[in-house]
Image (cartoon, grey):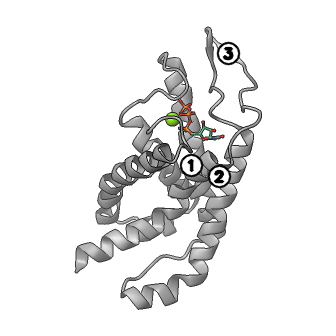
Amino acid sequence: MELVATVAAAFWAMLPAYVPNNAAVLFGGGPPIDAGRTWKGRRLLGDGKTWRGTVFGTLTGVALALLLSAINEPVGTAVGVDLPHFPLVVAFTLAFGAMLGDILASFLKRRTGRERGASFPGLDQLDFVVVALGLTALAAPGWFWSVFTWPVLAVVLVMTPVLHLSTNGIAYALHLKEEPW
Ligand code: CTP
Ligand code: MG
């Protein structure tokens, strides 16, 4: 089935960008990146964006990308799908890009008067994808366009909000996260 193969490749290619935000929820905390600074009476980023969460989130995503790279051939053969390998630069742009997208979204949320934890439908679900993929396309265009073909990108656009809402819902139900978005 062509669609199953496209979904499998899209999920595999996006895993290093999906995991950092969840790792940040688990490992986050400590001093906020904006060190409490405000702009026009509102926090620059807020207490939800910390150094520890960002560093651990990025490292977790990079480590996962390297692990997936080591097993892409046996797993791909087993499921009958050609799964991508991640060069180190791509491991970094996918993981750090995801964290940066989430940070930029918090910046926009504070500018639009939303307090920490408030939802911003659309932005919350796709912020990290846009920056992770954008940075990767800039840093490694050849790799990017060979893996993220238009059908794969279409799957990513549909699959990401569904996965994001369900994983955050689970994290909320487990009391790991204060809000379900
Ligand atoms: N987190 C972190 N550092 C990051 C991102 C997330 O420490 N760069 C941790 C924080 O403990 C944060 C939690 O993960 O509270 C959930 O992340 P998120 O939903 O992105 O943050 P919010 O607290 O909802 O804040 P915001 O409104 O700015 O998104
Ligand atoms: Mg949030």
Depth check: 177 or 105 in front? Answer: 177
| Residue at mark 1 to residue at mark 2: CA–CA distance | 6 Å
User: Which amino acid does the dot numbered 1 rest on?
Assistant: Asn
Q: Tell me: is circle 2 under 8 Å from ligand 1.
A: yes
Q: Which residue is mark 3?
A: 38
Expressed as whole percent of the image width and height from the top left, the position of residue 92 reads 64, 59
- The residue at 62%/27% (across/down) is 45
| Whether label 1 touches label 2, CB < 8 Å | yes
Q: Tell me: is circle 3 under 8 Å from ligand 1.
A: no
Image quadrant for the N terminus? bottom left
Q: Which residue is mark 2?
A: 57
| Residue at mark 3 to residue at mark 1: CA–CA distance | 24 Å
- The residue at 43%/91% (across/down) is 77
User: Which amino acid does the dot numbered 2 rest on?
Assistant: Gly
Earlier along the polypeptide chain: callout 1 or callout 2? 1
Earlier along the polypeptide chain: callout 3 or callout 2? 3
Q: Tell me: is circle 1 under 8 Å from ligand 1.
A: yes
Q: Which residue is mark 1?
A: 21
User: Which amino acid does the dot numbered 3 rest on?
Assistant: Thr
| Whether label 3 touches label 1, CB < 8 Å | no
Q: Residues within 10 Å of mark 1 (few under 14, many from 20)?
A: many
- The residue at 50%/69% (across/down) is 143
SS at circle 1: helix
Please identify, in this view, whether the residue under mark 3 or under mark 1 is nearer the observer: 1
Q: Residues within 10 Å of mark 2 (few under 14, many from 20)?
A: many
Image quadrant for the C terminus? top left
Depth check: 95 or 90 in front? Answer: 95
